Image (tube, grey):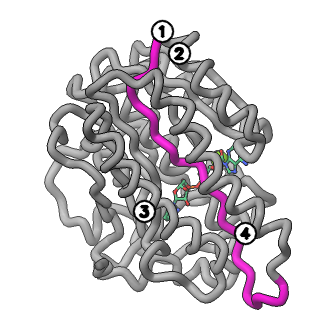
């Protein structure tokens, strides 16, 4: 079976076409996507790069977060998995894969827009895993709205709370527990520098995540805590079909990248592993673009 160490042509490595429109209600389920995304279930091979790490991963049920959680477990980490209660079936699948890797999986469903709940995830991780030294903030909300006059205050607020406030709450809560050598990996997007006209609220949060991460990276570096960012391009996940893009954008999704295809979640995993591992010890406040070749600042 080929894995992330198998050389192949990146153009033809994965599904090259666009996608059939297949609308789901939010937050959407990975289990219902067609074609099924590759989260590394049979393609990610661990080599012990995170042995003994104690990780909190948000958005861990599906998409990029699932790929990160599977990779972290196969690299030797125990993982607390956060997701929304509606995603229980996806999350149980990830827990099974973490356990198959011989690691501990802790299911922690709940809504990150609830400050008390978001903060409680840190205590849950410390209690269940005996500490915390890796935080991967992957959860995110993206809903396209074509006209500013149709963007409700409710949606604007919820996008901010999910993508930005929860990051602040989790990091603030985690820092007193994070020993030197700990790592925080946040999730931005190509939208942070190339905002689409119909993603005003979302793109704003993604630019904000880059700024917040670079400020925090400088503040926390002297404590030995490294903060870095992964900025994905178009990746085949439930986010996109559950309101992230208009249905009629799906046949073109990913086609305009230089590689000419959407990314698969597993292709994000090595970036999350690298930034979480000791081998990136001198990488601080970096934004690692994983976007099929779109130029970035
Ligand atoms: P996804 O739908 O699989 O993951 C997003 C997750 O966010 C959901 O599974 C859900 O568990 C979580 N979430 C949303 N609202 C929440 C809330 N209120 N409380 C708790 N959890 C909540 O989609 P994905 O594409 O894998 O998204 C993961 C991250 O990647 C997001 O931050 C997204 O912005 C970012 N991203 C995705 C793409 C892409 O093309 N798919 C591109 C750039 C960045
Ligand atoms: Mg999900």
Real-space CA distance between mark 3 and mark 4, rounded to the nearest whole angstrom: 23 Å
Which residue lies at the image location 60% right of the left edge and 56% below the top edge? Answer: 164
Give the left or right position of residue 232, taking residue 25 as reference: left
Magenta residues, start to end: 131-150
Q: Which residue is mark 2?
A: 126
Q: Please provide percent x and percent y for residue 237.
A: 56, 58
Real-space CA distance between mark 4 and mark 2, rounded to the nearest whole angstrom: 35 Å
CA neighbours of label 4 inside 10 A, class few (<14), some (14 to 19), many (20+): many
Q: Please provide percent x and percent y for residue 123.
A: 60, 19
* Mark 3 vs 4, N-terminal side: 3
Q: Quick check: is 146 in the magenta stretch? A: yes
* Mark 4 vs 2, N-terminal side: 2
Frontmost of labels 4 and 1 is: 1
Asked if disc 1 and disc 2 are in contact, CB closer than 8 Å, the reply is yes
Asked if disc 1 and disc 3 are in contact, CB closer than 8 Å, the reply is no
Q: Which residue is mark 3?
A: 210
Q: Is residue 245 above or below residue 231?
A: below
Which label number is shown at residue 243? 4
Most common secondary structure along the magenta stretch: loop
Q: Please provide percent x and percent y for residue 191.
A: 49, 74
Which residue lies at the image location 56% right of the left edge and 11% below the top edge? Answer: 128
* Mark 4 vs 1, N-terminal side: 1
Q: Quick check: is 199 in the magenta stretch? A: no
User: Could you tell me if residue 45 is visible in this image?
Assistant: no
Which label number is shown at residue 130? 1
Frontmost of labels 4 and 2 is: 2
């Amino acid at each position: 079976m080929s894995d992330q160490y198998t050389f192949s042509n990146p153009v033809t490595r994965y599904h090259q076409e666009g996608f059939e429109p297949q609308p789901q209600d939010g937050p959407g389920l990975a289990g219902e996507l067609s074609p099924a995304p590759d989260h590394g279930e049979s393609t990610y091979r661990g080599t012990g790069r995170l042995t003994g790490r104690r990780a909190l991963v948000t958005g861990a049920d599906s998409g990029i977060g699932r790929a990160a959680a599977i990779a972290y477990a196969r690299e030797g980490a125990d993982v607390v998995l956060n997701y929304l209660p509606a995603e229980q079936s996806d999350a149980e699948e990830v827990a099974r894969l973490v356990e198959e890797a011989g690691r501990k999986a802790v299911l922690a469903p709940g809504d990150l827009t609830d400050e008390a709940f978001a903060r409680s995830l840190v205590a849950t991780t410390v209690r269940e895993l005996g500490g915390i030294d890796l935080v991967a903030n992957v959860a995110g909300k993206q809903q396209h709205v074509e006209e500013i006059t149709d963007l409700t205050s409710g949606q604007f607020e919820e996008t901010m709370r999910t993508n930005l406030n929860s990051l602040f709450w989790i990091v603030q809560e985690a820092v007193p527990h994070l020993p030197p050598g700990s790592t925080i990996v946040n999730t931005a997007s190509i939208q942070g520098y190339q905002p689409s006209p119909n993603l005003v609220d979302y793109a704003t949060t993604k630019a904000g995540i880059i700024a917040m991460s670079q400020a925090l990276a400088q503040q926390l570096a002297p404590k030995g805590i490294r903060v870095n960012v992964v900025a994905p391009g178009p990746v085949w996940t439930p986010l996109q079909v559950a309101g992230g893009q208009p249905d009629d954008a799906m046949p073109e999704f990913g086609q305009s990248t230089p590689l000419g295809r959407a990314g698969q979640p597993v292709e994000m995993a090595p970036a999350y592993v690298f930034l979480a591992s000791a081998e990136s010890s001198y990488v601080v406040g970096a934004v690692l673009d994983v976007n099929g070749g779109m130029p970035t600042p």
